[in-house]
Amino acid sequence: MKAAEGVTEGMKLHDQMAWVGAMNSIRNRAEEIVLRDMIYEEDAV
């Protein structure tokens, strides 16, 4: 997800708040995928 969205270490150096927001978004989506697929065993979207 990080590579697909262009979130890089360079972004972290130049715009830390945007980097943090992007990483939080990626983490939240990844957590939802894990919960849906492994915990609740629902069909993939």
Image (cartoon, rainbow, N blue to C red):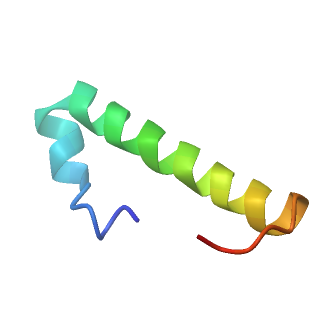
Q: Quadrant of the C terminus?
A: bottom right
Residue positioned 87% across, 59% down in the render: 40
Residue 11 drawn above or below residue 1 = above
Residue positioned 75% across, 59% down in the render: 36
Give the image location of residue 6, x and y in percent. 21, 61
The answer to whether residue 11 is left or right of residue 35 is left
Q: Of all residues shown, which one is farthest toward the left?
A: 14
The answer to whether residue 9 is left or right of residue 31 is left
Q: Of all residues shown, which one is farthest toward the top?
A: 17
Residue positioned 33% across, 42% down in the render: 22
Q: Nearer the viewer, residue 25 or 14?
A: 25
Residue positioned 16% across, 50% down in the render: 10
Residue 21 drawn above or below residue 40 = above
Residue 43 drawn above or below residue 8 = below
Give the image location of residue 31, x and y in percent. 66, 50
The answer to whether residue 44 is left or right of residue 39 is left
Give the image location of residue 29, x and y in percent. 54, 51
How many numbered circles are shown? Answer: 0
Q: Quadrant of the N terminus?
A: bottom left
The answer to whether residue 2 is left or right of residue 39 is left
